[in-house]
Amino acid sequence: MIRTDGSSSARAEREAELRAVTYLAPGLPLGLFEIVVTELACALGRGWTLQSEVQSSGPMHVHDDPFRTAAVDLGFLCSPSFLFLRSCAEPTIDLVPRGFVFADSRSAGRAQYFAELVVPASKGVRAFDELAGGVFGFNDSCSLSGYFAMQQHLCERRLDGFFSQQRCTGSHRASLDALRSGAIDCASIDSNVLARVFHEEPEWRAALHVLASFGPFPIQPIVVRRGKGLPTALELADLLDEVMLDSSVEAKLARHGVVGFAPLTETDFEAERCALARLGCLPPQDLDQIASEEQP
């Protein structure tokens, strides 16, 4: 876990801080989330802290929910975790109805992204069926772009046992390195992560072939904890709209590939909710039952 702190000495009280967590770095740059948290905290007159959780793309179990323990107030996480947390009997979060818009022409100003299925260019693979019996690499099992996009594709095509192995690499970058070393045969990569890699390390363009694109999917959501003394989701959405009126903030975000924010609602996640339900990944959560299970 990486933690950055924007609190001044005059704002050292924890209750005066906007405590944020991102599960999306370093695939997406930590600086991107620092900009957003800084601007929101400034508008709210608060100090801020930002944690970067690198072990997964978000919590997929009620016991891992940092919002339930009031450890954090604001979060950037992947869609499966958001849908899981919202499916709990007593949801702890609300969706901030704005999402990042990245500089991808396919997004056309909408808060969405894709999962890119990539293979080593040297292998000469040009059709999905050629991957049968190979090794699929994924960043973590909570990731939509890295993991669930492929599971949904396999489910839709009824391709049980298509891969000989599915291997967790730990991050999108580790998946790319595993492709280069030959440890895996294909990987599904967040389209914005891949665009960043291609921009910063152009040699990867020649090393990889994008075999297919899954999506579009709604962009990774921004969520806020339900609690007294916290801004509402709608208030934060209004603040994000105001932030984008500042050309200096717009320029900072642009350096990380973000061109603005666009409306994002729970309805936008409905198709993904249904897909995850078909995979059995959104079981109902009953807090009383969970509590009883914890009894010795």
Image: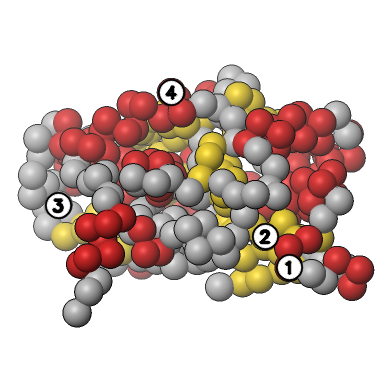
Task: Classify mark 2: residues with Cα within 10 Å, few (<14), some (14-19) or many (20+).
Answer: many
Left or right: residue 234 versus residue 38 is: left
Q: The N terminus appears in which quarter of the rendering?
A: bottom right
User: Which residue in the structure is indicated by mark 1?
Assistant: 14
Q: Marks 4/3: CA distance?
A: 33 Å
User: Which residue in the structure is indicated by mark 2?
Assistant: 19
Left or right: residue 55 versus residue 1 is: left
Where residue 234 sits, quadrant-wise, is top right
Evaluate if marks 2 and 3 touch, with contact meaning CB atoms under 8 Å apart.
no
Residue sitting at x 34%, y 32%: 272
Residue sitting at x 43%, y 45%: 91
Q: Marks 2/3: CA distance?
A: 41 Å
Task: Classify mark 4: residues with Cα within 10 Å, few (<14), some (14-19) or many (20+).
Answer: few
The amino acid type, in three-letter code, at marker 3 is: Phe
Evaluate if marks 4 and 3 touch, with contact meaning CB atoms under 8 Å apart.
no
Count of numbered badges drawn on the protein: 4
User: Which residue in the structure is indicated by mark 4?
Assistant: 267
User: Which residue in the structure is indicated by mark 3?
Assistant: 163
Q: The C terminus appears in which quarter of the rendering?
A: bottom left
